[in-house]
Image (cartoon, rainbow, N blue to C red):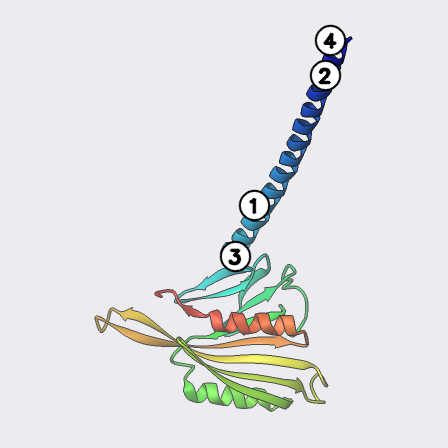
C-alpha cells in the first residue's frame, strides 16, 4: 500500500514538473516571439530612417530630392528649348494631356547665362505676381543660393481663387572653367511651382524639396 502511495506521489510530482516545464516552455516561446517582434519593428524603423521617404534626382551640376516612388520626367518647357522642366507626380506623367501643369510639382530650370540674369529673374517674378492676389512673400537663404517664396491666389481673369505656391531660386554652383584654368561659380535660376492644391502635407513636402537642392560637388 505504501509502495502504491509512493508511486502515486512520484507520478504526481513528475506530472507537475512536466506541466511546469511545459508552461515555462510556452512562456519562453511567447517571450521569444515578443522579442523577435520587437527586433523586427526596430529593424523596420532603422531601414525607414536609412532609406527615408525621398529619392534623389540629378541634373548636371546639382541634385534635388523628390518623394520616393513618385514619377519624374524632364522635358523642354518652350518651343525654343530655352528652359527645361522636371514634372513630379505620384501618378504616371501624361504628356498627351492638355493641361497647364504636367505634375503636382514642376521644377523649371533657366540655365543659359546669355539669356538669363538677375535682371531677367526680377522681371520674371514681377510678371508672375501680376496674376496673383493675397500674396504672402518669404525670403529664404540656403547654403547654395537665395529663394523668394510666394503663396497666393489666382486673380479673377485667370483661374479665380485657385491656390498657388512658388519658389524662385537663384542657385550657385562651382565648376571648373577649362578656358580660364580655374574653378568659377555658375548660376542657375530655378522655379519650383505648385498649382491649385491646398494641403499642408503637400506644402511641407514642397518646402523640403526646395531646400534639398545642392551642388553635386558637395
Q: Which mark is drawn over residue 90?
A: none
Read off the residue under disc 2. Answer: 11
Tell me where residue 205 sits by quadrant: bottom right
* Residue at x-position 50% and y-position 64%: 65
Q: Is residue 161 above or below residue 72?
A: below
* Element type at mark 4: helix
For the residues marked 2 and 4, what is the alpha-carbon distance in whole angstroms? 12 Å
Q: Nearer the viewer, residue 136 or 20?
A: 20
* Element type at mark 2: helix
Q: Which mark is drawn over residue 39?
A: 1
Q: Nearer the viewer, residue 117 or 81?
A: 117
Read off the residue under disc 3. Answer: 49
- Indicate which label's residue lies in the foreground, 3 or 2: 2
Q: Of the two numbered discs 1 and 4 on the same chain, state the one appearing first in sequence.
A: 4
Whether residues under marks 2 and 4 lie with C-beta atoms below 8 angstroms apart, the answer is no
For the residues marked 1 and 2, what is the alpha-carbon distance in whole angstroms? 41 Å
Residue 145 x %, y % = 41, 78
Read off the residue under disc 4. Answer: 3
Tell me where residue 207 sits by quadrant: bottom right
Amino acid at each position: 500500500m505504501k509502495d502504491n502511495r509512493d508511486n502515486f506521489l512520484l507520478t504526481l510530482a513528475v506530472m507537475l514538473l512536466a506541466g511546469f516545464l511545459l508552461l515555462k516552455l510556452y512562456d519562453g516561446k511567447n517571450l521569444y516571439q515578443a522579442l523577435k517582434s520587437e527586433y523586427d519593428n526596430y529593424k523596420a524603423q532603422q531601414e525607414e530612417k536609412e532609406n527615408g521617404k525621398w529619392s534623389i534626382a540629378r541634373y548636371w551640376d546639382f541634385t534635388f530630392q523628390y518623394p520616393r516612388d513618385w514619377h519624374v520626367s524632364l522635358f523642354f518647357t518652350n518651343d525654343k528649348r530655352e528652359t527645361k522642366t522636371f514634372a513630379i507626380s505620384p501618378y504616371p506623367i501624361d504628356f498627351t494631356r492638355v493641361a497647364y501643369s504636367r505634375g503636382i510639382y514642376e521644377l523649371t530650370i533657366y540655365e543659359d547665362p546669355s539669356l538669363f540674369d538677375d535682371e531677367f529673374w526680377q522681371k520674371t517674378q514681377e510678371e508672375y505676381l501680376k496674376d496673383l492676389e493675397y500674396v504672402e512673400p518669404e525670403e529664404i537663404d540656403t547654403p547654395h543660393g537665395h529663394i523668394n517664396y510666394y503663396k497666393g491666389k489666382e486673380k479673377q481673369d485667370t483661374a479665380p481663387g485657385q491656390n498657388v505656391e512658388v519658389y524662385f531660386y537663384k542657385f550657385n554652383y562651382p565648376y571648373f572653367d577649362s578656358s580660364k584654368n580655374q574653378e568659377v561659380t555658375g548660376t542657375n535660376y530655378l522655379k519650383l511651382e505648385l498649382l491649385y492644391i491646398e494641403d499642408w502635407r503637400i506644402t511641407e513636402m514642397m518646402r523640403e524639396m526646395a531646400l534639398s537642392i545642392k551642388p553635386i560637388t558637395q
